[in-house]
Image (cartoon, rainbow, N blue to C red):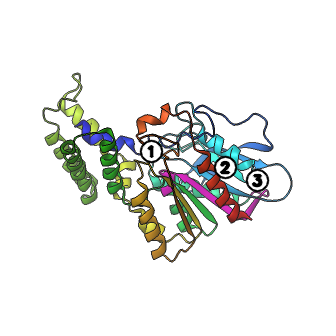
């Protein structure tokens, strides 16, 4: 049964570990900009989100971007294993004349709300609230508001942009563009192959997951979904050597059913990004590392281009960055197990590519 859990755990687990030079780098202490801790009210959800807005010093109005992290209980810095990627990105962009808002996810840090019951669309609602707030700030140029989303954040940015004309551009960092179930199955296969897993085991694990995903997509009634998933996992869990000795069979099944059927996962498995991407009309910049095993560049960049083209959007720029993984680190295999061992937290090439494109949008 362990095989059916592996694929669920990889997506977004390593969604952020950015830094420019060292694996534990922080932003410099001397800041040529001002930093303000603020609260944004999401009236629709009835919660307040806590975040930090960095604004270049000087007069006038500045372009602004909202940073959107991947799956996981991230604070405003998208902190992970000592890394503070969004702090680094905010510092880098603000030093280059772009205001940046980053915030604690709902239910995380100083933000209100319930993270555990939230879906991708709930997080999109939070981003929309942030955009509304920023549009009212006198230091912000309302005609130059953009979004930068990494991993699942790259799903959220198009959702927000497709519903609002206030978004003038979006940057997608290792963003999925194929259906959730297809993404996870492909991710599982690529990671297993990179590890040298026998083909027979890969196919068996893929089959187990595919059947579980099909149940989620087929049954929309919650009671029926619970019943069908419980029956399925009970069947494939018989004599499972991975079951903890201190757990009963019923407890083991319940643990895994709850994991598969949590709101975020159900929504993700049923979601097809293409339908949303077709509605995005603003300029889009999408980059993925050539060694990204979590969001494969070939399949996702092709799907992104196809969806935007179908919707009539001609403002797409895509790049596959050679030798970089899901976190845009220079790497050997692209396996998630390498992330924490790589001294370089993000390739300067990725940061430069992003900034150069942004400058074209805000000039």
Q: Is residue 268 above or below residue 20?
A: below
Q: Residue 60: x, y in percent?
A: 84, 59
Residue 97: which disc? 3
Q: Quote the CA–CA distance across marks 1 and 2.
A: 21 Å
- Counting from the top left corner in percent of width and height, residue 238 is at 13, 35
**Alpha-carbon distance for marks 2 and 3?**
13 Å
Residue at the limit of the structure toward the top, as seen here: 246
Disc number for residue 360: none
Tell me which segment is drawn in magenta: 137-155
SS under mark 1: loop
Give the class, few, some or many, for how many residues have Cα within 10 Å of label 3's Cα (few <14, many ≥20): some
Quadrant in the picture for residue 176: bottom left
- Residue at 40 percent of width and 47 percent of height: 293
Question: Residue under circle 1?
Answer: 12
**Crowding at mark 1 (Cα within 10 Å: few <14, some 14-19, many 20+):** some
Q: In the rendered image of this protein, does residue 114 appear above or below residue 318?
A: above
- In this figure, which residue is indicated by the disc labeled 2? 101
- Residue lying at 41% horizontally and 59% vertically, measured from the top left: 298
């Amino acid at each position: 049964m362990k095989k059916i859990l592996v694929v669920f755990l990889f997506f977004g687990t390593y969604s952020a570990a950015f830094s420019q030079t060292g694996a534990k780098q922080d932003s410099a202490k001397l800041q040529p900009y001002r930093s303000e801790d603020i609260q944004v009210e999401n009236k629709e959800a009835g919660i307040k989100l806590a975040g930090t807005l960095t604004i270049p010093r000087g007069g006038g109005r500045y372009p602004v971007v909202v940073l959107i992290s991947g799956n996981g209980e991230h604070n405003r810095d998208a902190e992970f294993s000592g890394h503070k990627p969004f702090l680094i990105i905010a510092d880098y962009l603000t030093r280059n004349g772009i205001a940046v808002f980053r915030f604690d996810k709902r239910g995380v840090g100083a933000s209100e709300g319930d993270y555990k019951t939230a879906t991708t669309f709930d997080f999109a609602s939070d981003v929309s609230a942030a955009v509304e707030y920023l549009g009212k700030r006198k230091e912000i140029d309302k005609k130059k508001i953009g979004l930068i989303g990494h991993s699942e954040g790259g799903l959220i940015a198009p959702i927000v942009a497709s519903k609002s004309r206030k978004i003038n551009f979006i940057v997608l960092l290792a963003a999925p563009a194929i259906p959730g179930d297809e993404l996870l199955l492909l991710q599982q296969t690529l990671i297993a192959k990179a590890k040298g897993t026998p083909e027979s085991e890969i196919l068996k694990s893929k089959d187990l997951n595919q059947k579980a995903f099909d149940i989620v997509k087929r049954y929309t009634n919650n009671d029926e979904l619970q019943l069908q998933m419980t029956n399925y996992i009970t069947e494939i869990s018989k004599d499972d050597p991975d079951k903890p000795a201190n757990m009963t069979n019923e407890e083991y099944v319940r643990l895994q059913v709850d994991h598969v059927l949590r709101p975020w996962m159900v929504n993700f498995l049923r979601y097809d990004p293409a339908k949303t991407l077709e509605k995005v009309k603003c300029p889009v910049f999408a980059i993925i590392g050539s060694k990204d095993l979590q969001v494969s560049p070939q399949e996702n960049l092709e799907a992104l281009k196809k969806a935007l083209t179908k919707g009539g959007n001609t403002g797409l720029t895509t790049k596959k960055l050679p030798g970089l993984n899901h976190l845009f680190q220079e790497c050997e295999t692209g396996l998630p197990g390498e992330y924490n061992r790589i001294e370089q937290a993000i390739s300067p090439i990725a940061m430069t590519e992003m900034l150069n494109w942004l400058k074209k949008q805000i000039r």
